[in-house]
Amino acid sequence: MSLRKTLVDWLDIRLGIRDLLEQNLTNYLLPRKINIWYTLGAVLLTLFGLQFVTGILLLVYYVPDTEQAFASVQAIMNEVPYGWLIRNLHAVGSNLIVVALLLHMLSVLFMNAYKKPRELTWLSGFLIFNLTLVLCLTGYLLPWSQLSFWATTVATEAPGAIPVIGDDIVRFLRGGAMVGDATLGRFFALHVMGLPLVFGLLVGVHLFCVRRAGISRPPFGEDYQGEPPRYTFEHEHHPGGIPFFPNYAVKDGAVICFFLAVLAVLVFFAPNLFIPPSAFEPADPFVTPPRIKPEWYFLWAYQTLKVFPSELIGLGIQGVLMTLLALLPFLDRSPERRPAKRPLFLVCFVLGILAFVGISVWGHLS
């Protein structure tokens, strides 16, 4: 008897492991017409796992002190064996995660998969998206370079436009009047402990909602039928569907490999696409470099603040847009999910993407 079978038998007697695997793998049926966009969840889990592992390895050598942070990052890049690879995987991987998150959210929006009974799935995913951006922001300061110092300075100045409490919020974020030791300490603690704990909880909630509420069927094809209204909870059934394992797991694996290949190409051949030259200069609070801008996924917010005569108006518009997006399942009550049957929604969807891209490009060039 093999060691593997002995271990599985031991676990099966105590936890019913075989039944658990059958329920969640071979007997877990998905809609037959499920498309490639549904694999982005598995892609994100893989990329987040890679961030977790590379982050722990970086912590072995990183020193969270303004006098030593930049030097410790340079030592990781130049002296630690394969340190450059780990650091680049972590830095470039965070950008690829934002790309995958945006694609995942856009696919959910396009297929109207946020509608009843999946409101909680959408809300938990929306919170994960925003928390990921905060994780990126807190991690951005840790190298203590010119780019990270001044980009963080610009980012933490924005709440100052809020009347009465704006200055207090800025001081709270920075731990003082300026970005310094206290800011680095706070951002470090949030990035490596506080936010990951909340993030792990949210991912667990999101996966629970996905499993309980079920996978939505793609709203395409002449034989598509809308879901009947629900008044009590019921497990979603997909008669004639395909097993998650091995049928769909193979597709998941293929798309995961594609994203890992893209990550490898970027890390080995174009890391500077996301790491500009100012990221290799130590932070100097007395020298403001020209054309400092936030990361590409914050450019739309950065440019919005510049467009309006008052930053408060820009912050208000951003807050309204994000609130509307979060509450979309409760505002859009129509049971129709087919994009072709919703021309107004389709126009707003396309215009929203064009506006995001256009404002971001504007912010990059301005």
Image (cartoon, rainbow, N blue to C red):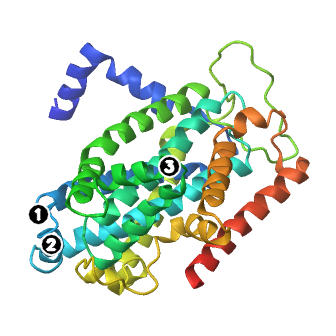
Residue shown at the point (45%, 47%) measured from the top left: 131
Which residue, as the protein is rendered here, is positioned at the far front?
Answer: 164
Nearer to us: label 2 or label 3: 3
Q: SS of the residue at dot 1?
A: loop
Q: Quadrant of the N terminus?
A: top left
Q: Is residue 54 visible?
A: no
| In-front residue for pair 57/364 | 364
Tell me the crowding category of disc 2: few under 14, some 14 to 19, or many 20 or more residues within 10 angstroms, Cα based: many
Residue 76 is marked as: 2
Residue 21 at what x, y percent from top left?
40, 28
Q: SS of the residue at dot 2?
A: helix
Residue 61 is marked as: 1
| Mark 1 or 3, nearer chain start | 1
Q: Amino acid under label 2? A: Ile
* Residue under label 3: 130
Q: Amino acid under label 3? A: Asn
Q: Are marks 1 and 3 in contact (CB under 8 Å)?
A: no
Q: Are marks 1 and 2 in contact (CB under 8 Å)?
A: yes
| In-front residue for pair 53/182 | 182
